[in-house]
Image: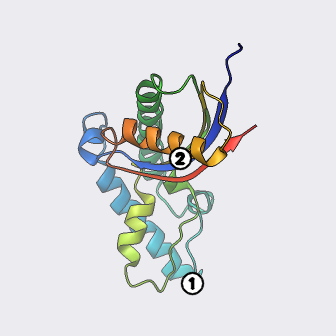
Amino acid sequence: MALQFTSISLSMKLAVAEDELERHLAASPSVVTDELVSHVKKHEKENRLGYFPALDYYINNNAIDADLVSALQSISWVVTNMVRNEIRIKLRPVFSNIKFESIQTLAYTLPQVRVSDKQLTEKLLEHFSANNVKVNLTVTLIQKFIDNSAAEKLAKNLTYQWLKNSFHSIDISGCKVVN
């Protein structure tokens, strides 16, 4: 009898603990994030955008100091590599195959923060923190499932259980069987 496989697409947001990052970085992630948020808020106030664009907008419009951008890029590179390596190491015993579709620091995505938000600074600090990463991957189980929801639930639970001690927080937002 041939082996049967089930592939599952997972989407998740992970946060690396700040103290873990500080052991690997020259620049303090929280200092970089504080400065970045200060520039973003100042630019919005001066230009009355009415919203907060993605980070590329600020970079392309020279609204953020080049050294700050460089520091953020360095931190993001370290964080995404740490996340990738940790996922590979932790999930290798569980899944027969792990394929990264994308891995991105959330700071480079569009903030879901309104200018009028009462917790504006806190939400911007969380969004632009380089320790928050969005990961999309496809994992494979050596098992054929008749019920896709059972496969999805198993993959989600296994992923959470095997990664929960490696990250400050884990939010698995999507899990779907793929053909």
Kindly identify the amino acid type of the residue bearing the numbered disc 1: Arg
**Pair 2/1: label in front:** 2
Q: Is residue 118 left or right of residue 145?
A: left
Front residue of this view, candidates 150 and 100:
150
Q: Which comes before the other along the chain, label 2 or label 1?
A: 1
Residue bearing the label numbered 2: 153
Residue 116: percent from left, percent from top: 47, 86
At x 53%, y 46%, the residue is: 153
Residue at the (65%, 36%) spot, across then down: 145
100 relative to 123, above or below? above
Residue type at mark 2 is Lys
Placement of 144 over or under 118, stated as above or below? above
Q: Quadrant of residue 75?
A: top left
Q: Are marks 2 and 1 in contact (CB under 8 Å)?
A: no
Q: Dot 2: what SS? A: helix
Question: Which residue is the site of mark 1?
Answer: 48
Q: Is residue 176 visible?
A: no
**Rendered location of residue 150, percent (x, y):** 58, 45
Crowding near pointer 1: few (<14 within 10 Å), some, many (20+)?
few
Q: Residue furthest right?
A: 179
- Image spot of residue 158 (x, y percent): 45, 38
The foreground one among 60 and 19 is 19
Give the image location of residue 3, x and y in percent: 67, 17
**Taking the image as drawn, is residue 25 in sight?**
yes
Tell me the quarter of the image containing the N terminus.
Answer: top right
The residue at the point 62 percent across, 62 percent down is: 57
Q: Residue 56: name its quadrant.
A: bottom right
Q: Is residue 143 left or right of residue 113?
A: right
- Quadrant in which the C terminus appears: top right
**Label 2 to label 1: alpha-carbon separation:** 45 Å
**172 is higher (above) or lower (below) than 101:** below
- Seen at 35% across and 45% down, the residue is 16
